[in-house]
Image (tube, rainbow, N blue to C red):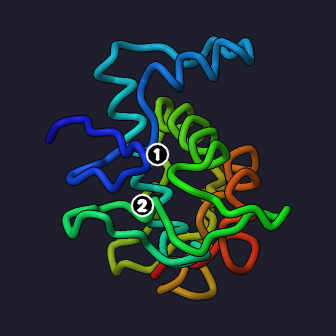
Amino acid sequence: MAFTVEDGTGVAGANAYIAVAYADAYFTDRGVTAWTGSNEVKQAAIIKATDYIETRWGDRFKGRPEFLDPRQPLGFPRLCLYDRAGQLVEGIPDKLMKATAEYALRALSGELMPDPTTDASGAMIAGNRQKVGPIETEVTYAASMGVRTLKPYPAADKLLSEYVNGGGARAVR
């Protein structure tokens, strides 16, 4: 799949909210040196960040999708979306682009949505403690097997907060 940036016009096949050049400039301006790698590595991180935004926040975005092209796969651009000041938000908002960069930086060093740790039966493990002598093992299971809360990324999450309904991390089944 090609790296295709949504430019606010409903690009068919878009899989990224920002270009590598945007992320490069964003992190250079902030003195962030961890944004490294080849262009392809950065593109993959941006795609992962965009996927994360769509999965975590997509069904909670305010407004409604502005499907300029029926093949438009992303939630932005949107219709009837207003910022906190009451101004109409058009195209791809700056805060969404900044959040995409922040998530992409985190995607360089790990999975944004890692699979939960489970035992052989599929039960989600909340904690695991072992003691060597005398041998002792203790496993703590999550209270609810089917629901887990997504890891917070405050720098990025806060940027998107005015564009989503409700607050905090949402549970994923």
Q: Position of residue 56 (x, y in %)?
A: 52, 66
Q: Is residue 117 visible?
A: no
Position of 74 with respect to 63 (left or right) is: left
Residue at mark 1: 49
The part of the image, by quadrant, that contains residue 83 is bottom right
Residue at left offset 67%, top offset 66%: 163
Label 1: state its secondary structure: helix
Q: Position of residue 104 (x, y in %)?
A: 50, 36
User: Neighbour class for label 2 at 10 Å: few (<14), some, many (≥20)?
Assistant: few
The part of the image, by quadrant, that contains residue 138 is bottom right
Q: Which mark is residue 119?
A: none
Residue at left offset 49%, top offset 14%: 36
Between residue 44 and residue 68, name the one nearer to us: 68
Q: Is residue 32 above or below residue 44?
A: above
Which residue type does callout 2 highlight? Asp
Which residue type does callout 1 highlight? Ala
Residue at left offset 67%, top offset 63%: 88
Q: Is residue 96 visible?
A: yes
Labelled pair 2, 1 in contact (Cβ < 8 Å): no
Residue at mark 2: 115
Q: Is residue 159 above or below residue 83?
A: above
Mark 2 vs mark 1, CA separation in Å: 16 Å
Between residue 41 and residue 150, name the one nearer to us: 41
Q: Is residue 22 above or below residue 46?
A: above
Q: Position of residue 153 (x, y in %)?
A: 68, 50
* Total numbered labels: 2
Position of 67 with respect to 94 (left or right) is: left
Label 2 or label 1, whichever lies nearer to me, is 1
User: Neighbour class for label 1 at 10 Å: few (<14), some, many (≥20)?
Assistant: many
Say which quadrant the N terminus sits in. Answer: top left
Residue at left offset 41%, top offset 34%: 45
